[in-house]
Amino acid sequence: MSNITKNLKKYKYFYILLIPTILYYIIFCYMPMYGITLAFKEFNFNNGIMRSPWVGLKNFNEIFQYKDFWSAFKNTLVISAGRLIFEFPIPIIVALLLNEMSKHRLKSIYQTVFTFPHFLSWIVLSGVIVNLLNDAGIVNQFLVSIGYEKADILVNPSKFRPFIYTTNIWKEVGWSAIIYLAAIAGINPELYEAAIVDGAGRFQRMKAITWPSIKNTVAVLFILAIGNSMGGGAKGFDQIFNLYNPAVYNVSDILDTYIYRTTFYTGASFGVSTAVGLFKSVINFILLYTANYVVKRLGEEGLV
Amino acid sequence: MATSIKKSSFDLTHNANKSPHDKFVDIVISVLLGILALISIFPFYNVILVSIADPISIAEQGVYLIPTSFDFSSYGYIFSQKKFGSSILISLFVTLVGTFINILCTFTGGYVLSKKFVPGTKFLKNAIIFTMLFNGGLIPYYLTLKNFGFINNIMVMIFPAAISTFYLIIVINYFITFPASLEESAKIDGANDILILFRIVLPASLPTLACITLFYSVDRWNEWWLAMLFISDLNKYPLQLLLRDMLTNYAKLEGQLGISHVKVYDQGLKMAVVVFTALPILCVYPFLQKYFASGIMIGSVKG
């Protein structure tokens, strides 16, 4: 006991400095975790969380009956997989291409342009996108002027997911490419010189020198991407929430948007909505640890 | 932009010795990326176009690409309406005060957590990283914050967002690389740890401080989720939320703002608000660029 008080006294200024951080994580991260018990209770407003009655797995049985729940779960998996397949490789390719550019001014300008959308919110970007693609927008004006029919991307279930992937690429490719470019910048230029002397062509150099040096960065970012799967990708909620509409719920409603709607609009019981949230968090945790484990087995440094 | 200014590996091979094939591929890459850059920027051009457009001119032309008339009434309307002004002020308040709180909490906590010799830091770091992997979910979060009185309280955009774990990890990793000698000599002179942090360490950390401050400011300016969950009073809306209401529920806002159809082109007004909301980001963008590819970002990926 006296050891602890001794330490407290010795490091007291440090602990004082630590107070805001500790308070923040306790109040805004750990206290809500207690509320997870709601998933196993029937929430009664008057009783609050603590005094609401336990109902075991009843809420989970309930949500597993809902078609909308399974639709949201399926969409979450499909969209996350889609992001890994379509969105994930693009910044790598763009980084490799940018790296090949010898004209610095132009490369700088391109980087500036590509990275700009990353700093705007999805609210602003949804305004920009909808302005472009809606019925009276310039894209449709153009299509009509060359004799085609208007495009209905925003409300067409078969076009909506590709639209989501494309717009997210537009937003994030510049920023993600920077992380790869930073890794590439760390490569010893002598390696390239030697390779050129040996007669290696552009793609051979990429394969033999550039790629192995960024492999680990790719692996770490890949794990992070998997860790975001249950959210429909990093900022998946932000994007989908601001772009989706009832016409495309069946292909784009993810667990987070489903939870939001059932909490604030359709008035499902709080216990039920919390159960969906807990389901999502547990699966996410398992996915993240598995991905980290697999990557470590493949020989790369993991995240944890 | 350290990365882009650093010479590309090819500069070391004399450009003159490049084969015609190499030069051709160079051009193809430049053109390809150039086209992508134009496509990337076009939507923003379109926004500006519509914000200064006269709906009649748009209807007259088949494809409205070049402005034929300039109509600034949308912008004039924004300046005249109190609601826009108050939302902008709220966003500014949240950005300034919020960023200050962000920096205060992140750098104090980050400093201590970087000191491995302080007992408990390892446990705390693990507890913090755990919150990145698992959280209580929307409803528990909502109920907790409700109990703390954050409903319809603009501070909800500041305190629940006080620390970004991602930036905290960056700051911790940064402080780990900070030379201990500076702190040690101050300690010998009798300074306590708090003084050391504020008088010596932070002034010597200006680049990181500036970088994280910028990134936090952008996040605070873009804050809308917390406002949407907890703020229903239009007078307390940050600009992002006002914009969202305009984009998704213009009719309701029309009623509350008293917008008349005839005087204001609705799409033009929406785009003018988009421009207003994006403008501050555009203004700090050159400063953000300075910090892009610095080691801080790399450190964050590994850390």
Image: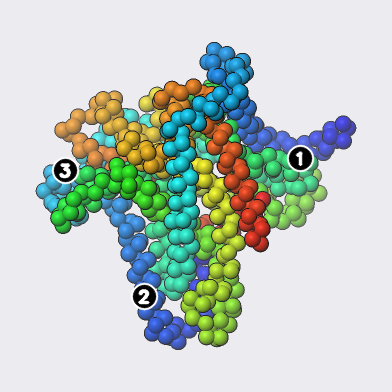
**Letter of the chain that mark 1 sits on in the rendering:** B
Is the residue at mark 3 from the same chain as the one at mark 1? Answer: yes
Q: Amino acid at mark 1?
A: Gly
Mark drawn on residue B120: 1
Mark identifier at residue B27: 2
Left or right side of B80 for A215: right
Q: Is residue B298 left or right of residue A255?
A: right
Q: Quadrant of residue A71?
A: top left
Q: Amino acid at mark 3?
A: Pro
Q: Earlier in the sequence, mark 2 or mark 3?
A: 2
Output the chain of dot 3. Answer: B
Q: Amino acid at mark 2?
A: Ile
**Residue A171 visible, this orientation:** no
- Which label number is shown at residue B55? 3
The chain carrying label 2 is B
Element carrying mark 1: loop
Q: Nearer the viewer, residue B211 or B219?
A: B219
The Cα atoms of the two marked residues, 3 and 1, are separated by 64 Å
**Residue B180 in view:** yes
How many angstroms separate mark 2 from mark 1 (CA)? 57 Å
Quadrant including the N terminus of chain A: top right
- Residue displayed at 76% across by 55% down: B181
Give the camera-side residue of A203 and B252.
A203
The answer to whether tags 2 and 1 share a subunit is: yes
Q: Are marks 2 and 3 on the same chain?
A: yes
Tell which residue pokes out farthest to the left in this image.
B60
Q: Residues within 10 Å of mark 1 (few under 14, many from 20)?
A: few
Q: Specify the quadrant of the image occupied by residue A156.
A: top left
Residue A107 in the image: above or below residue A246? below
Tell me which residue sits at (52%, 62%) in the image: A180
